[in-house]
Amino acid sequence: MPEYGQVTQELRGKLEEIVGDKHVSESPEDLEKHAIDESLEPPHPPEVVVSPGSTEEVSAVMRLAYSERIPVTPQGSRTGLSGGSHPVFGGIALNLERMNSILEIDEENLMAVVEPGVLIVDLHAETEKLGLLYPPDPGQESGSLGGNISTNAGGVRGMKYGVTRDFVHGLEAVLPSGEVITMGGKIVKNSTAYSLLDLIIGSEGTLAVVTKATLRLVPKPRHTALVFVPFDSTRDAANTVSEIVRRKVVPYALEYMPRHAVETAQRYLERKLPDDSHPAYLLIAVEGNTVDEVESQLETVGEVCLEMGAEDAYVADTAAKQEQLWEGRKCLFDAYKAFWEIDEVDACVPRKHIPDYIEGAEVAAERHGVIVSNVGHAGDGNVHSIIARGELDEETWREVLDAVIGELIDLALSLGGTISGEHGLGLAKKRYLPRQVEEAQIELMRGIKRAFDPHNILNPGKVFDL
Ligand SMILES: Cc1cc2nc3c(=O)[nH]c(=O)nc-3n(C[C@H](O)[C@H](O)[C@H](O)COP(=O)(O)OP(=O)(O)OC[C@H]3O[C@@H](n4cnc5c(N)ncnc54)[C@H](O)[C@@H]3O)c2cc1C
């Protein structure tokens, strides 16, 4: 365990001088609130919660922490699913919620400039008013853009548009020493030297604190349509995903739901979805600038689904009906959490191996007597396996959970996949990293971490062991 300094009364006084006394808190409620994210990891309370309001304040806090060797854990909205924002070694929880201004939406350059605490739902609302779209769309809309950037978040539009990394063109960040660096900007191309910007994206708050971001926008397509298609087997539904793409239609979202997920959503929402009598479902969303464009994509999607064994399709042709269907998909994490103790694996596999992954996961679930509901972003191969305790007693659940997670990760890796598609490794999945990458790669990562953070004060204990 690294040797760290303590948050003394004197240090607390210096923090208050930097950010103002009402933005430094040691209240039990605040320490409890900032000890956890949405993962199943046990709480890790910080010694103090500090909420800076500007880059200068972040920089001054980091300079102080650096000189006193205090661990600092950057936190956005704490909706992460891998324990990334847990202050494992106590110290300072650096709460970035106050830095929540959309500084600019530049319609000529199609870029937005934001502070890290802006919620993704707010950026979506502001850009949409101007007919623009920031495509990354992680299911948790109260996540912050700083958190999204630091986990390289994805979401339902990943299939067509990619993930957060594909939209970050500039960053301002504070190094552990307190120095402020700026990378990129409102530029579309950038081949100048090493891309530290790309290193910081997805680094889960271990290299630098993101204090400002320049994000690329696109024109928002005018029309959308959504269909909910029941299938008689998992394999038929999963194979349909690749077949749609082979026919040159790229839906903006293509989500998979097994019957168990549909039933769980209905129970949670206390209302019916259009069908719950089939083993597997696809939710397919297309978009375009004209009604014809959307209809021609829908036609191809419909043909493929029928050829692949679907007997029916429910088309949501109004915004309200689309919203209701999306709610059925987007509530699933909360729905499972409401009824069972759960954990999750967000492995990502090449799209054509989705049937193999889903079937393998179902076999593992049956062998271990747990519920595994494979839901989510089938279009980009990032099916989330929600593992629910079901009828198991506490002791057996604890024993089998580790085995199931390990098996699902091994299954994904054997299919050419990756441990995490969008949630990151944080604390919860870091021990699996050696299963995917060679020791030589981890050693390179350790070297990068030491170059940024020689005293290991920024979000220590995450992603890999030093
Ligand atoms: C119901 C539900 C659905 C979800 N759906 C999706 C989904 O579809 N796709 C997806 O990708 N994720 C999803 N998530 C996970 C989560 O919302 C994302 O990981 C999100 O990006 C986290 O943002 P946050 O602000 O809550 O970050 P936090 O949880 O606070 O932090 C996440 C990580 O980022 C670091 N960090 C935060 N802010 C900064 C900063 N300014 N500078 C440096 N490091 C920072 C933290 O140290 C931590 O390592 C979902 C979560 C839930 C609960």
Image: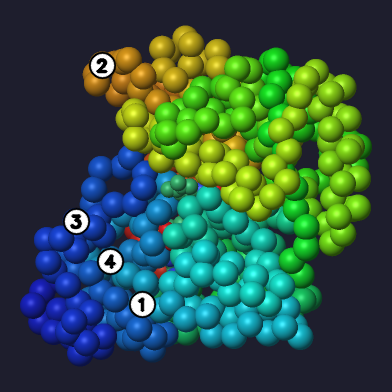
In the image, 353 versus 375, the foreground residue is 375
Q: Quadrant of residue 242?
A: top right
Residue 368's spot in the image, x, y percent? Answer: 42, 13
User: Residue 405: in sight, yes or no?
Assistant: no
Q: Quadrant of residue 127?
A: bottom right
Instruction: Give the mark nearer the N terminus: 2 vs 1.
Output: 1
The amino acid pointed to by label 2 is: Asp
Pointer 3 residue: 32
Q: Is residue 135 above or below residue 38?
A: below
Pointer 1 residue: 98
At label 1, counting other C-alpha atoms closer than 10 Å, the crowd grade (few under 14, some 14-19, many 20 or more) is some
Q: Residue at x 84, y 24 (%)?
A: 306
Alpha carbon separation for disc pair 2 and 1: 42 Å
Alpha carbon separation for disc pair 2 and 3: 28 Å
At label 2, counting other C-alpha atoms closer than 10 Å, the crowd grade (few under 14, some 14-19, many 20 or more) is few
Q: Quadrant of residue 48?
A: bottom left
Pointer 2 residue: 393
Q: Are marks 3 and 4 in contact (CB under 8 Å)?
A: no
Q: Residue at x 68, y 67 (%)?
A: 133
Alpha carbon separation for disc pair 4 and 1: 13 Å
The amino acid pointed to by label 1 is: Arg
| Direction from residue 290 to residue 267 in the image, left or right | left
Q: Is residue 325 above or below residue 183?
A: above
The amino acid pointed to by label 4 is: Ala
Pointer 4 residue: 93
Residue 221's spot in the image, x, y percent? Answer: 78, 62
Alpha carbon separation for disc pair 4 and 2: 35 Å
Query: Helix, strand or loop at disc 2?
Result: loop
Alpha carbon separation for disc pair 3 and 4: 11 Å
Residue 138's spot in the image, x, y percent? Answer: 55, 53
Q: Is mark 4 within 8 Å of ligand 1?
A: no
User: Residue 319: in sight, yes or no?
Assistant: yes
